Amino acid sequence: MKISTLYGRLHCATASRGRRTRAAAQAPRARYAGWSRGLRSALLASALLLLPTPSIAQTPELVFLSNITATSRDAVPLTTVEEQTAAALDALGEQLRAHGLGYDDVVAMNVFLRDSRHFQAMNGVYRGYFATDPPTRATVEADLTDRDALVQISAVATPDETEVVLPPGLQSPALPYSWGIRAGDVLFIAGATSRDPETYQPVRGDVQTQTRRVFGNIGMVLEAAGMDYGDLVACKVFLDDVRLWGDMNTAYREFVTAEDPPARAAVRGGLMNPDFLVEIQCVAERSEERRVVLREGQRRGRSPLSPAIATGERVWLSGMLARGEDAEAEARNTLASLGGTLEAAGLGFGDVVDVWVYLTDVRDADTVLEVLAEMVPEGVATTVVGLPLVGRLGVEIQMTAVVR
């Protein structure tokens, strides 16, 4: 099987398997920030006797798997999206097993299709791998680095216990994904589009109308997980048309906190339903240590995002970009900004565990990856996709780092 995959992990995976439960409403929670390990363990043991659902570790281990494609099997080319989806998901399974994990441990997926018309065919195969309590997911049309690939996937998994979040009043999706999955204090939220919460039918309108509906649905997921908009740490915004960026921002800033909005990347991604203008995929993390990270001398920009959000356990960085005479120069200048932000958080590129590279022209992938390899250790999960940027630049890089 011809497989292209770059993968990394956060901490060391164990052989234990995560147990997935369901949460339909907010459960009692305790904040452990700043408490001793012994006291945490004692309180956790007590909570197991009190809570109706199993308790979840507060700091989940996350495993990142990226850029998985499969275009041949046993030297035979795979030419249909059904064949490639099955082979790519088989390859994902192999990577999961290498970490002592399985498909049930996947909490978030990103599926990139070369052609959005393959959406239904891809889903037909995908359901067979995630028939029950599937992971959260976002699916967009993108240019892929593998010229023969029709589908490319990236995933996040955990060996720790998880809960599927089922918000009351939000219709269960007809597609194979869950609205939210919580692992400890980290909540993964599916790419949300403008759907009526009671009927799951599209809510049409301009991008501001749709963005408000998107955040309404995200808010229901947050509430069911015992969180709120102030716990959002990182978002990915996929716009059907980058010219909608300004109007999207107007509605977006109504929901995120003004003093510490989540880190963010916003790009053009072909959406799966022509009724939709925007899709937003988010991660939330509850933390008493939450703070905005700014480089020395840096000021907040006008956009409703933070350069990075530190939670005490992780640093979630925004997609950054910088001017340069070509893709190589843009990548180097962007990495300089990212490096300065990491330094301000007391970290470095050696602490990075997940990288996303968005390219206006996917043919720049090799050049950008060569520059990235000079800075980031080998083996770090790196998702690379052709998704046009807002503005005239061609390279945007987003990262997640861990406080070791």
Image: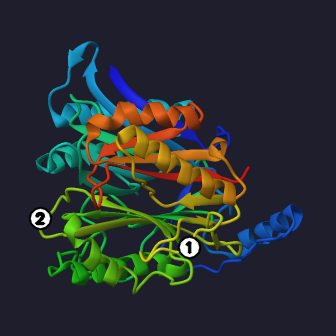
User: Which of these two is toward me, 171 or 58?
Assistant: 58
Q: CA distance from mark 1 to mark 2?
A: 38 Å
Q: Amino acid at mark 2?
A: Pro
Furthest residue toward front: 325
Residue at 69 percent across and 52 percent down: it is 347
Name the disc covering residue 10, or none.
none
Q: Secondary structure at mark 2?
A: loop
Judge left or right: residue 291 versus residue 248.
Answer: right
* Residue 245 image-quadrant placement: bottom left
User: Which of these two is toward me, 338 or 211?
Assistant: 338
Task: Of the two numbered discs 1 and 2 on the same chain, state the one appearing first in sequence.
Answer: 2
In this figure, which colouring scheme has been used for the structure? rainbow
Q: Can you identify the residue that label 2 sits on?
A: 274
Q: Is residue 275 visible?
A: yes
Judge left or right: residue 19 versus residue 11.
Answer: left
Residue at 71 percent across and 64 percent down: it is 312
User: Which of these two is toward me, 83 or 131?
Assistant: 83
Residue at 52 percent across and 32 percent down: it is 373
Crowd around label 1: few <14 · some 14–19 · many ≥20 (10 Å): few
On the image, the x and y values in percent for residue 348 come to 67, 47
On the image, the x and y values in percent for residue 297 come to 63, 68
Judge left or right: residue 127 versus residue 231.
Answer: left
Q: Amino acid at mark 1?
A: Arg
Q: Secondary structure at mark 1?
A: loop
Q: Can you identify the residue that label 1 sits on?
A: 299
On the image, the x and y values in percent for residue 364 come to 31, 36
Q: Is residue 25 visible?
A: no
User: Which of these two is toward me, 212 or 99?
Assistant: 212
